[in-house]
Amino acid sequence: MTDKCTQNSCCNEADLELPSQESIEHRPTQSLIDATSIIGFPVIFSLLIIVLLFIVQSNQAIDSIVFTFEALIRISPFILLSVMIAAYLKASGSDQIVANAFQGNPLKSIIVASVFGAISPFCSCGVVPLVAGLLVAGVPIAPVLAFCIASPIMDPEMFILTAAELGLDFALIKTAAAIFMGAMTGYVTLLISRSGFLDDSLKDIAKPSCSTSCSSESYYEVVYGFWGNYERRQIFIKETLLVAIFLTRWLAFAFLLESLMIAYIPSEFIISWLGAGNAYALPLAVLLGVPAYLNGYAAIPLVGGLIEMGMSPATALAFMLAGSVTSIPAGIAIWSLAKPRLFSLYLVFAASGSMIAGYLFLFWLNI
């Protein structure tokens, strides 16, 4: 048994073996069982919102319910894909291979995480099980947070749509901004984490487990074709179900809030503040980029219209970056894994990174 395990009371000889059927219940999924209880924060608040809407404005209550269900159905293939990938990584033991890519030299791992986040096909919510798996596998917070910042900004499909609507140059600059923001977040987080400020800043669902952090690779064997192994098959099934329930609760709450933002914050209000002639348009773009309906694909036509009205492309970039990283789905995804101080740090990085990227682009345009 290694010295690291000796110092941790939760590690024992059982941790150095492939989990038995009985030990499955004590794996990291136990924290998921607690997190996925039917009565919880997102369910309670969702029900309260719906009840209040039926009392105050019943039509909006129906519209919000329909919007939520349609949004869940629309992204369900991406959620299912991300959940099954995370469950496969856990059951096969290959989560350590992915985790190792984000570990090692911090300078390298943060850049790798930022680039991977910018090009990965996962949406801001669908990436939750993968991020949770990385954290459980013992990946440091700095590269994971870099990945979380870069991931909602760009993906392959969004790159194509952005290039088609706003031009290839803008799409490339937005991708570069995603990598820049991820790297900035990772390196600053690395410095902050060395002070101890981020110790115990993760919720139970994302805390490293002894089975992965204390055992050596020789004991935790990677089995890609695991389905014939009963224990690993049970891990896959359990992880798939529990993470799917966990995500559905939080996503339903996120989309419910998004429907309210769409209903009560009209796009005309955004245009009046971010259009041509406002000297404070860029910092306001960051502040007003929070509404969820500015996230991802929905922001592309709106930003195209703003640019046609005379808004600077730099302001448009800051607007899209802030909307992507601080949108309700992305924010709730991080909130579900991080404690308040780490979540607050995420918001600071999102706002400051969007602002810096916008001003850098503005400087480049004026050269």
Image (cartoon, helix red, strand yellow):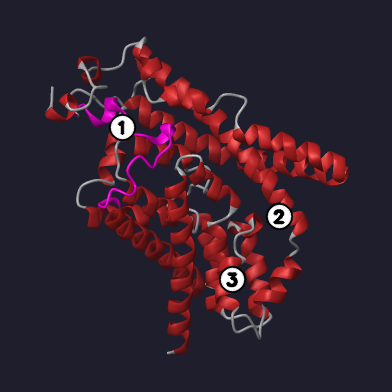
**Helix, strand or loop at disc 2?**
helix
**In the rendered view, does 328 fall on the left or right side of 232?**
right
Label 2 vs label 1, nearer the camera: 2
**Helix, strand or loop at disc 1?**
loop
**In the rendered view, does 161 fall on the left or right side of 13?**
right
Residue 233 on image: x %, y %: 40, 18
Residue 110 on image: x %, y %: 30, 55
Q: Which residues are magenta?
A: 193-216
Residue that mark 3 sits on: 285
Label 1 vs label 3, nearer the camera: 3
Residue that mark 1 sits on: 94
Say above or below: 101 vs 12: below
Q: Earlier in the sequence, mark 2 or mark 1?
A: 1
Question: What amino acid is found at the position of numbered circle 2 in the picture?
Answer: Met
Camera-nearest residue between 142 and 227:
142
Q: Is residue 111 visible?
A: no
Residue 265 on image: x %, y %: 74, 61
Question: What amino acid is found at the position of numbered circle 1 in the picture?
Answer: Ser
Q: Dot 1: within a 10 Å radius of its alpha carbon, few (fewer than 14), some, or many (20 or more) residues? A: some
| Residue lying at 67% horizontally and 32% vertically, measured from the top left | 44
| Residue lying at 42% horizontally and 29% vertically, measured from the top left | 87
